[in-house]
Image (spheres, helix red, strand yellow):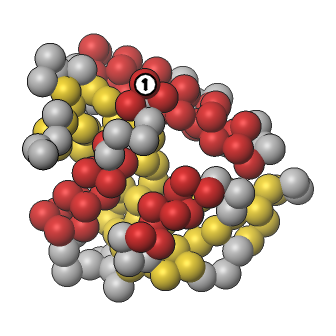
Amino acid sequence: MPSPLAVRPLDLTEDGTASAVHRIGRAAYAVEAELIGFDGIPALRESLAQMREQPLHWLGAVAQDGAVAGFLAWAVEPDGSARIDRLCVSPAWFRRGAASLLLRHVLSEVLPDRTVTVTTGAANAPAVTLYERLGFVRGADFSPAPGLTMASFTRP
C-alpha cells in the first residue's frame, strides 16, 4: 500500500513551513522528554528564529493536503559524513511510518554513499528500535548532562 505521505525538501524561509516544523519539533521533543525523563532537550527551548538559523538541510514527510507530518534535518560534516540533527514526527502521525519514510529516503536517495550518524535519548525505545531496524549500529552511550544518557548510532 503506498504511503499517504511524500518526501519533499522543506524551505524554512517560508513562514508557514517554518512554523509547522517548529510546532512539530516542540511537540515531538516534549514526548521524547517524557520518554527519557529529561526536559532539557535544547530544541524544546529553541525559538523559531533560532531554528531557522541552523545550518541544516531539511526534508519533510508531507500529506496530500500539504500538511507537514514530520521532518528530518541533517548536516554534512567536514569529513564528508552526515549527522542527522533531528528527526521529528507530529504526535498525530506517530506509528504511521513517517519517520521510517524520511529516514529510508535520506539514506537511499540523499546520502547513499556517506557514513551517517545520529544520537537519541538512550531511553527513547521507539527511536532506538527504528535506527537499529534501518541498519544503524549502536556505539557508546554518553552523558552530556546530569540525568541524561544518549545513545549514538552509525550507519556506514
Q: Is residue 14 left or right of residue 127?
A: left
Image quarter of residue 131: bottom left
Give the position of the N terminus as an image quadrant. top left
Which residue is disc 1 drawn over? 92
**Secondary structure state at the residue bearing disc 1:** helix
Q: Amino acid at mark 1?
A: Ala
Tell which of 79 and 28 is nearer to you. Answer: 28
Residue 28 in sight in this render: yes
Question: What residue appears at the point 20 percent right and 58 percent down from the top-left corner?
Answer: 105
Question: What residue appears at the point 74 percent right and 48 percent down from the top-left corner?
Answer: 36
Q: Is residue 152 left or right of residue 94?
A: right
Q: Residue furthest right?
A: 146
Question: What residue appears at the point 73 percent right and 37 percent down from the top-left corner?
Answer: 34
Residue 47, position in %: x, y? 54, 24
Give the position of the C terminus as an image quadrant. bottom left
Tell which of 94 and 83 is nearer to you. Answer: 94
Against 155, residue 128 (above or below) is above
Residue 117 in sight in this render: no
Residue 13, position in %: x, y? 24, 25
Q: Is residue 127 left or right of residue 144?
A: left
For label 1, the crowd category at 10 Å Cα-Cα, with few meaning under 14, some 14 to 19 and many 20 or more, is few
